[in-house]
Amino acid sequence: MGYSRIGTVIIKFWLHIDRDEQLRRLQAREASPQLAWRVTEADWHAREKWDLYEAAVEELLLETSTLPAPWTIVESNDPRWAQVKTLRTVVDTLAKELKYTPNTGLAGADQAGDKRRKPKGVGDATPEEATRMAKADKQGDKKNKRDKKDKKDKKDKKDKKS
């Protein structure tokens, strides 16, 4: 990654979805009354030329990727994973270019009583693993809340009997 002539850090992303995901998204938009207007005949016509577009994209990436500013290809079938990879690339690139070590936890997370925490193990995860971990983490949070509520209810019941 590098600077432009005027000192701007340049980071280029290509967000890629596969053919099946594009079809799924187009069909989902058409099925939604709020989003159907976004899908046009041009979308379906362009889809028929997928192979030509793919070849053009490959040429574009090869011709415009440079050592100071290479393309980062982001697998975007899973939007959450795309966000994680994009943001991680921005943070890592800026840290390298600015010679800065970012705090890997959430801002202020080390303060006493702060219940926020950084994601577990996303660092080396594939897109599928990251999604699975995020869902499991969310379910674990819900279970912990239920357990705490159950304990509190039992304690309240016990206190009422006393």
Image (spheres, grey):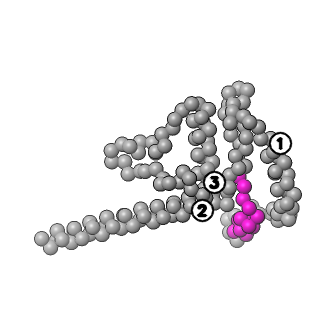
Q: Position of residue 51 (x, y in %)?
A: 85, 60
Q: Tell whether position 81 is magenta.
A: no
Disc 2, disc 1: CB below 8 Å? no
Q: Which residue shows up at 82% across the image and 56% down it?
A: 54
Front residue of 13/30: it is: 13
Q: Quadrant of the N terminus?
A: top right
Front residue of 119/49: it is: 119
Q: Which residues are magenta?
A: 15-30
What residue is pinned by disc 3? 82
Left or right, 146 with reference to 66: left
Residue 27 lies, with reference to residue 110, above or below; the image says: below
Q: Main secondary structure of the magenta part?
A: helix
Residue 121 lies, with reference to residue 31, above or below; the image says: above
Q: Position of residue 102 (x, y in %)?
A: 51, 38
Q: Which mark is residue 63?
A: 1
Front residue of 71/145: it is: 71
Within 10 Å of the Cα at label 1, are there few (<14), some (14-19), or many (20+) other Cα atoms? few
What residue is pinned by disc 2? 128
The kind of residue on which mark 3 rests is Ala
Within 10 Å of the Cα at label 3, are there few (<14), some (14-19), or many (20+) other Cα atoms? some
Q: Position of residue 60 (x, y in %)?
A: 82, 46
Q: Nearer the viewer, mark 1 or mark 3?
A: 1
Q: Secondary structure at mark 2?
A: helix
The kind of residue on which mark 1 rests is Glu
The kind of residue on which mark 2 rests is Glu
Q: Which residue shows up at 72% across the image and 55% down it?
A: 16
